Amino acid sequence: MQRKSLWLLMVPAVLASLALGGCVVAPPRARVVAVVPVRVWVPGYWASGHVWIDGHWRYR
């Protein structure tokens, strides 16, 4: 009987200490791969006011 009462007191005590301990277990974050800017060609076009904009490279 004494072992049962000890068990019945220890289980809630351990659970309470785990609940109130403040330790948060979270899964590890996924690694974020750095994205390298890609050069893209922008073709020439007519802008407003009949202005021709030459083609040029820009970074995306």
Image (tube, helix red, strand yellow):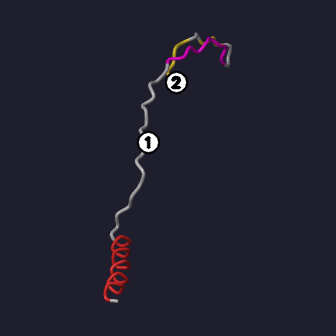
- Residue reaching furthest front? 1
Q: Residue at x 56, y 14 (%)?
A: 41
What x and y, as percent, mark residue 40? 54, 17
Q: In this view, does 50 lie to the left or right of 23?
A: right
What x and y, as percent, mark residue 19? 38, 71
Instruction: Give whichever of 1, 14 is nearer the camera.
Output: 1
**Considering only vertical position in the picture, is 16 above or below 24?**
below
| Amino acid on which disc 2 is placed | Arg
Instruction: Give whichever of 42, 8 is nearer the camera.
Output: 8
Indicate which disc residue 30 carries: 1
Mark-to-mark CA distance, 2 and 1: 24 Å
Q: Which residue is drawn at 39% across and 58% down?
A: 25
Instruction: Give whichever of 43, 50 is nearer the camera.
Output: 43
Going from N to C along the chain, the mark reached first, 2 or 1, is 1
- The secondary structure type at the circle numbered 1 is loop
The residue beneath circle 2 is 60
- The secondary structure type at the circle numbered 2 is loop
Instruction: Give whichever of 36, 3 is nearer the camera.
Output: 3
> Magenta segment, principal secondary structure?
strand
In magenta, the rendered stretch is: 39-47
| Amino acid on which disc 1 is placed | Ala
